[in-house]
Amino acid sequence: MTHQPLPDASLDQLFRAARTQNAWTDAPVSETLIRAIYDLMRMGPTSANCSPARFVFVTSEEGKAKLSPFLSAGNRAKTMKAPAIAIIGHDMKFYDEIPRLFPHAPGAREWFTAPAVAEATAFRNGSLQGAYFMLAARALGLDCGPMSGFDQAGVDAAFFSGTDIKSNFICSIGIGDPAAIFERSPRLAFEEACKIV
């Protein structure tokens, strides 16, 4: 397969014109679309294909009422108005799936079982998958509102009780209201953030 650069319109949709949303229209996000986002996201690379990310998609009023108490005051109202809210977590025992996900290396599970290695690997790769999730949502025409302002222990108890999953961040998805977007904040220039050696 020969790859070509994406057209500017696609780059704008994914990066340059994409913004963190603060308000949402009433346009729904269907289960079909949520599944399509996941099907794209899961193709992104992770260490030894470990795929530690786990998602809870909150779309019902009951689910939102369960989530609401754990959101910071500044995030609560805008999050509750989103048509869908993804709780993005990572499975601390992701390595149990390695024999199935990375079958050509039979001993690969043992690479990750030490607690410090498991924790770092789950968080790093789960964060990568969270970023893939946002790009997949944008690629399919949705806007994103990622945030980390929430009570992590509370969310874990409410949504991941009895599992080895830890929440990482929350991302609302839907069609954003452009009237509520802040002016874009500055970004570091290449020379400030990068070296070529």
Image: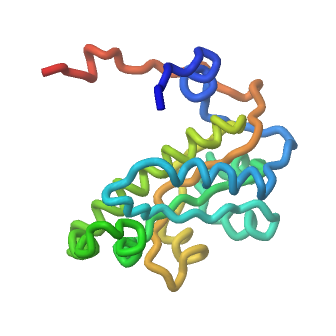
Residue 115: x %, y % from top left: 24, 74
Task: Classify residue 21 as left or right of residue 187.
Answer: right
Q: Which residue is pictured at 64% across the width and 35% down the height?
A: 139
Name the residue nearer the viewer: 89 or 101.
101
Residue 80: x %, y % from top left: 74, 53
Q: Which residue is pictured at 68% across the width and 27% down the height?
A: 181
Residue 95, compared with residue 122, is above or below; it is below
Q: Which residue is pictured at 70% across the width and 70% down the height?
A: 66
Report which quarter residue 16 is drawn in.
Answer: top right
Task: Classify residue 174 as left or right of residue 184.
Answer: right
Name the residue nearer the viewer: 187 or 46.
46
- Going by the picture, which residue comes out furthest to the front? 1
Q: Which quarter of the rendering shows the C terminus?
A: top left
- Going by the picture, which residue comes out furthest to the bottom? 162
Residue 123, compared with residue 176, is above or below; it is below
Residue 94: x %, y % from top left: 39, 71
Task: Classify residue 150 as left or right of residue 50.
Answer: right
